[in-house]
Image (cartoon, rainbow, N blue to C red):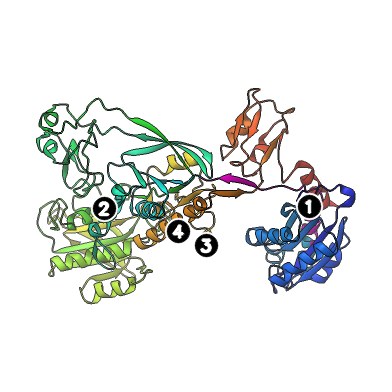
Amino acid sequence: MSQKKGAEDVRIGVFVCHCGTNIAGVINVEELVKYSSKLPGVVVAKDYRFMCSDPGQKMIKDAIRDFNLNRVVVAACSPRLHEETFRKAVEEAGLNPFLFEMANIREHSSWVHMRYPKEALEKAKDIIKMAVAKVRNSEPLEVMKVPVKKSCLIIGGGIAGISAALDLADAGFEVHLVESTPSIGGRMAQLDKTFPTMDCSACILTPKMVMVARHPNIKLHAYSEIVNVDGYIGNFKVKILEKARYVKGDACTGCGLCSEVCPVYVPNEFEMGLGARKAIYVPFPQAVPNTFTIDRDKCIECNLCTNVCEAQAIDFNMQDKEVEVDVGTIIVATGYDIFHPYEMYQYGYGKYENVITSLHMERLLSASGPTGGKVIVPSTGEKPKKIAFVQCVGSRDEHFFPYCSRVCCMYSLKHARQIKEKYPDAEVYIFFIDVRAFGKGYEEFYEIAAREYGVKVMRGKVAEIYEDPKTKKLMVRAEDSLLGEPIEMDFDMVVLAPAVKPSAGAEKVQRILKLSRSADGFFLEAHPKLRPVDTFTDGVFLAGMAQGPKDIPDAVAQAKGAAAGAAALMGKGEVTVEPYYAVVNQEICSGCKTCSGICPYGAISYNEDGRATINTVLCKGCGACAAACPSNAIEPNHFKFHQILEQIIAAFE
């Protein structure tokens, strides 16, 4: 399929789509077809109501055969929608699919100029004329076949990473699961119960954690991080730094004697600082792997742990170790962090001991938490009689995080319900802007909390929280927006529902994998509706809160989608890569290295002569290097300089 045509025998067909009334309702399609038929090289021009339909595609195929066409232009919608549709159609008719060009006259003309039909028609003519000028100089390209290794790297060991790992491993693929903390489980491991079913979080999560550790197809890299990724779809080389635990994982029995004798106490991160841990510890009782870790920054090297360890598992000479693995696909499931609202001075967080966050409340409610499941007022140790929950702390706030965190309304209702179950006489208030009960069973959960448990829901944004110097009660000032009146109430403790934000390691992962992030800092998907788990880097997928705020069911669903996408690639054994890449003129290249610094895909390296070379699989043909090259030594093979010039000339004729 290598049609190499000279300029003298170019035969172009132009096909104009009505797109129902989206185009034809504004632009005179008949006149547009007549104009197109007179352009240089065009031998046939036709129109149809829906060119993307089967009859429309048949019209194109028949015209290619009947008129011996070797170039095709379809004037219709955005190429993001139907470029692949028309490429397949021309290929089925025997034409190289890259001798096809799409002219976007809907988004670029009829939609934006719907009130000016004459001007829209003239602009559509120019768009088609430029497309014809480009395709007239197009050359046939051939797709590339790339082998795909049947192994997947998953970054992040929360519920999303665990779900994806188990799905892929059960399908027979090798999985490398990398978690930066000493145990997998993520934020879900810190939760007491899950809404709306009120299931025990550990009861759901722990069996899956154990399955990960025992699965023969999963290699667990806990307490590790990604340091470098090279390669491309199907063939990624990954360097993983396995941090030293100073405890041999294969020898440690998890007996805990070492922790019992350790004299060093430090705040327990897992318990949100409400409890203490030792310098040698496991994060929580159900941790996987259940191997102790020594915090060398806090360890005083007293050797008491070494003396009591019968398994001789403690080794202070252990070093960080770097391992390299080859994988075909990557899933990013780096999770999220909680915003600590110290900067929101009006809420008194960090100033008043009895102002806590929702994650603190999770640990207070947990039977395995620092208080054994008893909710207490931090300053007194007494059970609270009156509690306020404040929603949207940092969320939906243009000064902090403009987006909705999606889980806060429901977990606050969950906490309120749990408190009422423990202390029926306690008064529980929730101050909210809007209750967003969007998920299955969520509206019913909200109704039950308010009606059956007597949780008082107040619509109004909290303006200030301060402590009464006499009573030590927390005073909450807010507006009851339903009554349009200011209110002030006293509480024993206040629970803030802070925003969720991208995890601390997201920026490093973005840099290593060369991914895009949206304005909110979460990883950007290739398309919000059609490709919600894909990234712009082929072979790399997103799962869970790495992509944006979501609840556990949505995180698991997205993880399964990412696993399915990765499995589809690995199952085929090879993948087709479009031949869009930059080409370097070695005679002109000066080796200045400007291009490699600007390439977002890491596709440029240098040969022994110091001149640029392109990895054609990594390269996406974006043209950034071509624009930056001071010698004009690089150009995309599908959008060459003379094609651009021909389009410019056509536009100004």
Q: Please tell me in which quadrant of the rendered image residue 460 appears.
A: bottom left
Q: Can you identify the residue that label 1 sits on?
A: 135
Mark 3: which amino acid?
Answer: Lys
Q: Can you identify the residue that label 4 sits on?
A: 561
Q: Please tell me in which quadrant of the rendered image residue 506 appears.
A: top left
Read off the magenta span. Answer: 125-148
Provide residue 98's location: percent of width, then percent of height. Answer: 72, 52
Check disc 3 and report its element: helix, strand or loop: loop
Provide residue 323's location: percent of width, then percent of height. Answer: 39, 33
Mark 4: which amino acid?
Answer: Gly
How many neighbours does mark 2 have within 10 angstroms: few (below 14), some (14-19), or many (20 or more)? Answer: many
Mark 1: which amino acid?
Answer: Val
Provide residue 615's location: percent of width, then percent of height. Answer: 61, 37
Q: Is residue 90 visible?
A: yes
Mark 2: which amino acid?
Answer: Ala
Contact between marks 1 and 3 (CB within 8 A): the answer is no
Gap in angstroms between the C-alphas marked 1 and 3: 31 Å
Provide residue 304's location: percent of width, then percent of height. Answer: 11, 29
